[in-house]
Image: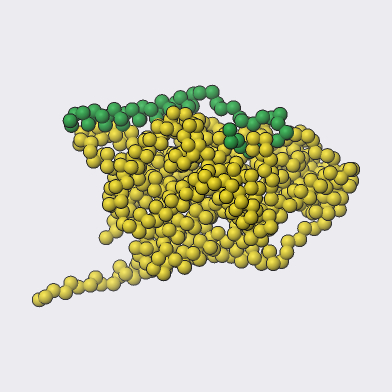
Amino acid sequence: MPAPRRLRVARQAPVVVWALVVALVVLGPALGPGFLLVRDMVWVPDLALRADALGLGSGLPRAVPSDAVVAVLDEVVPGMLLQKLVLVLALAAGGVGAARLLDADRTASLVLRLVAVTAYGWNALVAERLLMGAWPVLVGYAVLPWLLDAARRWRAEGRLPPALLVLVPLGCLSASAGLATALAVLAGAAGRGRTLKAALLVAAANAPWLVAGLLHASAATSDPAAAEVFALRGEGSVPAPLAALTLGGIWNTAVQPDTRTGALGWVALVALLALAAVGARPWWRRTPSRDRLALLVCWAVGWGLAVLTWLAPALVGWASEHVPGAGVVRDGARTLVLCAPLLVVLVAEGVRALAGRVPRERVARAALAIGAVLLPVALLPDLALGVDHRIAPADYPADYDRARDVVAEHGHGDVLVLPLSSYRAPTWNHRHLVLDPIGRYLARDYVASDVLVIDGVPLSGEDPRVGDAARALAEPTPGERAAALGRIGIGVVVVDPDAPGTAPPDVAGDRLLESEVLQVVALDDVDRRDVQTSWQVAMAAAWLAYTGLLALWPLLVVRARRGRAARTALPSPRRVTGE
Amino acid sequence: MKILTTFAAMVVGGGIAAGSMYGLLASQTAAPANSPTNVNAPEFDYGSNN
């Protein structure tokens, strides 16, 4: 019989509080006023819901559906606050979900559940993805244990839990997060007539990026050299496959926490693996086989794909070059989100097994409990306070607002962002590296470089309009450049004079803004860039499928409540005796 | 044996707790990491394999 609601809340409360504490310590000063702008994490005060956010831009849709979701939500909650809420909730919710996963049989003590919270919210994967600015991956990571828990309830109760209609779309904010979500749902729910429903569910939630990717199939193959660059990588002297066992091993050594590359990296590996090994046997005995299967499938696919990028980068490169969309798995460490649920459950089970061997002296048990809960912190102290202050809030210069206003009032056509380099390190952002934010700040569709430079070597981008723009800029006179840009639908040129490299060539037009931060030029004759009707219909269907899940959620909640009420109202069956 | 296990549990648990606090404080009192970007480069590196 389920515990009364009051008792369930009381049981969960310390776990939720600890998860929030962990999230707040991880972010620390990053939660101050301002926007967190780091690598791919670009949030603006008011993101516009425009064609590229809906998957109808000219480039490969890299921020679908995350940009559209943010553009809608920031109409209700200001962008700055929304970003902080998303990050805090993502970091905290994952830990609470992991504790629920561990506590499926309601036998896990509070200490064990707190261990699960810390282990899930404080690890190399969280640090590295925060520094990469991969917030949709972190949201998907947070959703993962909840998905597995909901899938288990689906199997047990025989009814689709309404929560999945929200959790699955939330877990599919990017392509890689969507694939991990799909695998977790299928691994957890497949079987006995649920497989088709689960497949339809994940297909609908992944439809926006999937359909947009298919529409851009000609550009959906990526530079084969990228597979080598983005492959799983060792951390310090810890080899890549071993680093992956404790959720580390991102390709970018610049975001690997210092402690992971030193002796503490080895200590973390030994400590976590030892606990997992101790916990493996009791976990195997305690856990129903179907639950074991779900966690093991997720772990095996996650670790296997990650190690494949390290073991056979040429194969991954060939697939990225020839199979549209295969480049999604080229960032090897990203699939490690799938390994986290099993690792965390095994570590907590290891603590349970060790606790059983400790005498009942209160001091000893308390010391061991505190040590177990804080172990992930001891192994990775530099995750604290915005990953050692490497994420810090910043305010956009006032000229960004002026640029947004003048672009909205004057001119037409899309925006071209110059110079043609993807990343900036503005002084107003503490010189932290960030994807050029001006395109997102403005309300129009924009063209910007999508070339990635790794160790000075450029990896080609996918947006064909960038090449068209570069050719237009190569024309000999400002007037000819403006005319050529106008022919590809560019109506406004925005130049960041603070960006590195040689200054872009002049383009003829009306100078709408001239400052040390931004220059804005409106062009005269601009051709309209039309989006094919078939593309619009296809994307409308994809968005209908995605939003349809969210719309169905309240209906399913009401139906489930009525079903529970009806069952409660039924008289309990009278025991039949032999008398 | 019981005393030994109790002592070991206290040492391990207390050690980890102390280590956590020391690590947190040490990492926060060290000089802040410099931005890895080279402002004079023609284009910023998105990342590094080295």
Horizontal relation, residue A414 to residue A308: left or right: right
Q: Colour of chain A?
A: yellow
Task: Check the picture and name the quadrant holding the C terminus of chain A.
Answer: bottom left
Closer-to-camera residue (A485/A515): A485
Where in the figure is residue A162, as x and y percent of width and height?
44, 62
Q: Does A360 appear above or below A510?
A: above
Q: Is residue A256 visible?
A: yes
Q: Does A85 appear above or below A381?
A: below
Where in the figure is residue A156, as x and y percent of width and height?
34, 63
Q: Residue furthest left?
A: A579
Q: Colour of chain B?
A: green
Q: In the image, what residue occupies the spot 29% across and 45% down?
A: A109
Horizontal relation, residue A242 to residue A567: left or right: right
Horizontal relation, residue A328 to residue A379: left or right: right
Where in the figure is residue A229, as x and y percent of width and height?
60, 41
Q: In the image, what residue occupies the spot 68% across and 55% down?
A: A219
Image-quadrant location for residue A526: bottom right
Q: Is residue A407 visible?
A: no
Q: In the image, what residue occupies the spot 73% across and 33% down?
A: B42
